[in-house]
Amino acid sequence: MDRRRDMLPVNQPDKFLRFIEKELIPFIEKDYIVINRILYGHSFAGGFVINSMMLSPGLFDKYIASSPTPVMDFIDREKYVQLDKKLPADIYFYFSYGSKDMKQVRKWGLKLNESLTGIKFDRVKWKIISMKIKIITIRI
């Protein structure tokens, strides 16, 4: 099944996010104690994580976007300033990318770091992590 329809802004990922918010979370929290809500995604899902953070601020406590496919303008500093003002509680935002990621992902990681550095956030706690990746081939 092609999950891009749920992840990409052009395909209305807000429907998938509404499902998570209105059906999935209540279903889980009905039977389990939940201390922190964490949304993690890689590639297209990483872009979905960032989009979700902007669309439904505070739905999750922690947002982890790993090597997110650039699916929206998530470098715009003003979006994060506005997000910080809307939040009912602190959130944690982690953005990671590796040295072997697509050039565009690495470039966006650096730009996002530049963009967010120097902003005094009250609610958004953030960290951008650049990982050095080494590929090892073992021949048998």
Image (cartoon, grey):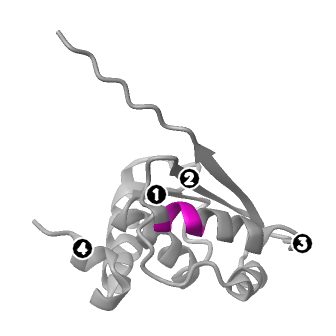
Residue lying at the far top of the rendered structure: 140
Give the number of callouts.
4
Q: Which residues are magenta?
A: 104-108
Above or below, 76 relative to 137: below
Q: Quadrant of residue 135?
A: top left
7 lies left or right of 118: left
Question: In the displayed structure, does residue 133 sit left or right of residue 58?
Answer: left
User: Separation of disc 4 and disc 3 at Cα?
Assistant: 34 Å
Pointer 4 residue: 4
Q: CA distance from mark 4 to mark 1?
A: 15 Å
Report the amino acid beneath label 3: Lys
Residue marked by disc 2: 96
Quadrant holding the C terminus: top left
Amino acid type, label 2:
Ser
Screen quadrant of the N terminus: bottom left
Per the model, the C-alpha gap separating discs 3 and 2 is 21 Å
Percent position (x, y) of residue 59? Answer: 55, 71
Q: Is residue 126 left or right of residue 95?
A: right
The crowd level at tag 4 (other Cα within 10 Å; few <14, some 14-19, many 20+) is some
Q: Earlier in the sequence, mark 2 or mark 1?
A: 1
Secondary-structure class at tag 3: loop
Whether the residues at callouts 1 and 3 have beta carbons within 8 Å, the answer is: no
- Pointer 2 or 4: first along the chain: 4
Nearest to viewer (mark 3 / mark 2): 2
Q: Quadrant of residue 15?
A: bottom left
Dot 4 or dot 1, earlier in sequence = 4
Mark 2 surroundings: few (<14), some (14-19) or many (≥20) residues within 10 A: some
- Magenta segment, principal secondary structure? helix
